[in-house]
Image (cartoon, helix red, strand yellow):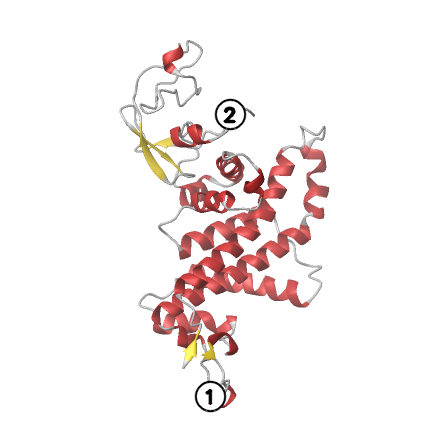
Amino acid sequence: MISNTPTPEDFYTSGKELLNFAWNSTAELLINFSQADFFGYDGTEISESYWAAAKRTLTTALTVIQQAVELIIKGRIAEVSPYLLISDTPSRWPSPYEKKPVDFERFRTIDAQDLIKVHDTFASTAFDSSFVDKFQNLRSIRNIVTHSAGKNITVQVAEVVESALYMHKSLFPSECWFSVRREFLRNSPGAQMEADEFATNHACWEASIVKNMLKPVQVKDYLSVDKKQRSYFCPACLDDASTNDKFDFRLAVLQPKGAETTNIYCPVCNATHPVQRVNCKNHDCDGNVISPDSGRCLTCADWQSDM
């Protein structure tokens, strides 16, 4: 008898935690760099040296993303049967004659190089070639970084960000990364010492940086918004965030796009919110997208009842 048999959710939870860990270190670099002018530096002048100093952090983040993906693929396999994950011949298995159940963790599990093959053999839907190529590329980088100094590896921050977003979307297509990220932030150690608004402010800040950094097609793929479309405050995020430090992250867009549209989508909430199309009472604002719940203009954030 085998005890402590893992469930698919066990692997998914662990995999997402590692994705969040890799994202956290990368996002910290991006946020610090975005504040260069605040600390009296010219971002264009220090960019090269800053990202050169971040090389080890970025390569480590990529290796952690790869480890996360391996765990999540194991979860996919476990949906068929967790016992497919056991490798080695029976002669090398732990003994079942010790008068107690054999803990699953005592078994050696299949190597990363075999995960795709095992998954595609037993799962109802195989991974597509794009995912496989991306997975193998990450494995190659991980092996170099893990087993050597990796002196010739060059990793751009956009590559790390895109890899995390691509893998999350491929493996959890119904989820939005920034919604998942906000939940991690709400349960992070730092959140225990911050105001309740910490998670929303930080997730919106990260999403804003990433939206500006990625290409329009990538923004559409990973945030489900049109980068070229006019953006607005999300009414839910605006209510949930702290505005003491000038909360100025407009990430929501009208969906579908149009002058009569009365719904707005936010990639941090991963939700659609109703809006009213009436002119803002602030004469300095040309907005006409108002939250019916809070009574705030989603262009300038002013309260309409106070005008």
Q: Which residue type carries mark 2?
A: Thr
The quarter of the image holding the C terminus is top left
Q: Is residue 182 left or right of residue 50?
A: left
Q: Where is residue 8 drawn, in percent x and y?
A: 40, 64
Q: Where is residue 202 drawn, in percent x and y?
A: 53, 37
Viewer-side residue, 178 vs 112? 178
Q: Is residue 74 left or right of residue 273?
A: right
Q: Which residue type carries mark 1?
A: Pro
Viewer-side residue, 172 vs 103? 103
Q: Where is residue 3 drawn, in percent x and y?
A: 43, 76
Q: Where is residue 249 drawn, in percent x and y?
A: 49, 30
Check the image and report above or below for 276 versus 241.
Answer: above
Check the image and report above or below for 62 versus 86.
Answer: above
Residue 278, by quadrant, is: top left
Q: Which mark is residue 245?
A: none
Q: Is residue 262 left or right of residue 246?
A: left
How crowded pointer 2 is (Cα within 10 Å; few <14, some 14-19, many 20+) is rated as few
Residue reaching furthest to the front: 99
Looking at the image, which residue is at 38% across and 49% down? 175
How crowded pointer 1 is (Cα within 10 Å; few <14, some 14-19, many 20+) is rated as few
The residue at which mark 1 appears reads as: 90
Instruction: Measure the alpha-carbon separation of dots 1 and 2.
Output: 61 Å
The quarter of the image holding the N terminus is bottom left
Helix, strand or loop under label 2: loop
Helix, strand or loop under label 1: helix
The residue at which mark 2 appears reads as: 243
Residue 218, by quadrant, is: top left
Check the image and report above or below for 241 versus 306.
Answer: below
Viewer-side residue, 212 vs 234? 234
Q: Earlier in the sequence, mark 1 or mark 2?
A: 1
Check the image and report above or below for 303 versus 141.
Answer: above
Looking at the image, which residue is at 30% across and 20% down? 277
